[in-house]
Image (spheres, rainbow, N blue to C red):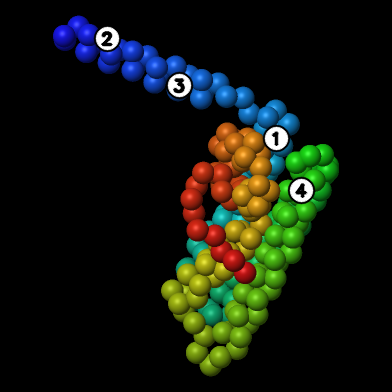
Amino acid sequence: MRTAAALVVLALVASACTAVEEEAVDPVDPIYLAAAEELCPIMWDWQKNVGAAMNSMSYEARREVDALTRRMLYLEAFDRIRELNAQLDATVVSLGDADPLDQIVPDVRLGLEASNSILERSGSKVDQEYSELEPPTYAEIVPVLFLDIEKAIDVVKPEMATYQNDELIDAFTAVPQCQHGVKDANDGIPRYVP
């Protein structure tokens, strides 16, 4: 009786392992995978550079006692991010318009336009705040600016679910940088809607 039960368990384990192996070797569309491997590292590098610009600004502004100098640092950070957006725009255009980039690149470019609009509004907010008799402290304004930058990053990331293509999503999920460079590549993070 025990021997029969053991054989059943072994059979179930073997069946499960076979299923896992079959699932593991399920091929990813090579065209979609090549697009993911090309686009996602670019998007991730851009995001890291935007973060570096904000972190550098934050470090300098935290040490600065003069309010007008802090204002200048905030606006310079926004200018730097606009430069990074322009560089990303030129880079994604250079990738060409082969499938599926012909769908994704226009969405990235629209996202960059929205990102620049967020930066413009945030810059106007800084100007307005620092025109007051009592401008905000570092602790009061920097968290708000970082939230704005998170939105400015988020709107640029293409949302894979909108393409309604499971093979495309599988390919972008297979590339580690896509967890940061696009939306809905298995990260489950709620998204900002402008």
Q: Secondary structure at mark 4?
A: helix
Count how many numbered circles sit on residues in the image: 4
Tell me the quadrant of the picture where the C terminus can be found: bottom right
Query: Residue 176: percent from the left, percent from the top?
Result: 55, 37
Q: Which mark is residue 32?
A: 1
Give the CA distance from mark 2 to mark 3. Answer: 18 Å
Q: Secondary structure at mark 3?
A: helix
Q: Secondary structure at mark 2?
A: helix
Evaluate if marks 4 and 1 touch, with contact meaning CB atoms under 8 Å apart: no
Evaluate if marks 2 and 1 touch, with contact meaning CB atoms under 8 Å apart: no
Q: Nearer the viewer, mark 2 or mark 1?
A: 2
**Tag 4: amino acid:** Gln
Q: Which residue is mark 4?
A: 103
Of the numbered discs 2 and 3, the one sitting upstream in the chain is 2
Give the CA distance from mark 1 to mark 3. Answer: 25 Å
Query: Residue 45: percent from the left, percent from the top?
Result: 63, 46
Of the numbered discs 4 and 2, the one sitting upstream in the chain is 2
Evaluate if marks 1 and 3 touch, with contact meaning CB atoms under 8 Å apart: no
Of the numbered discs 1 and 3, the one sitting upstream in the chain is 3
Between 115 and 134, the one nearer to me in the picture: 115
Evaluate if marks 4 and 3 touch, with contact meaning CB atoms under 8 Å apart: no
Give the CA distance from mark 4 to mark 3. Answer: 34 Å
Q: Residue sitting at 56 percent across and 48 percent down?
A: 184
Q: Which residue is mark 2?
A: 7
Q: Which mark is residue 19?
A: 3
Q: Nearer the viewer, mark 4 or mark 3?
A: 3
**Tag 3: amino acid:** Ala
Is any atom of residue 162 visible in this view? yes
**Tag 2: amino acid:** Leu
Give the CA distance from mark 4 to mark 2. Answer: 52 Å
Between 15 and 192, the one nearer to me in the picture: 15
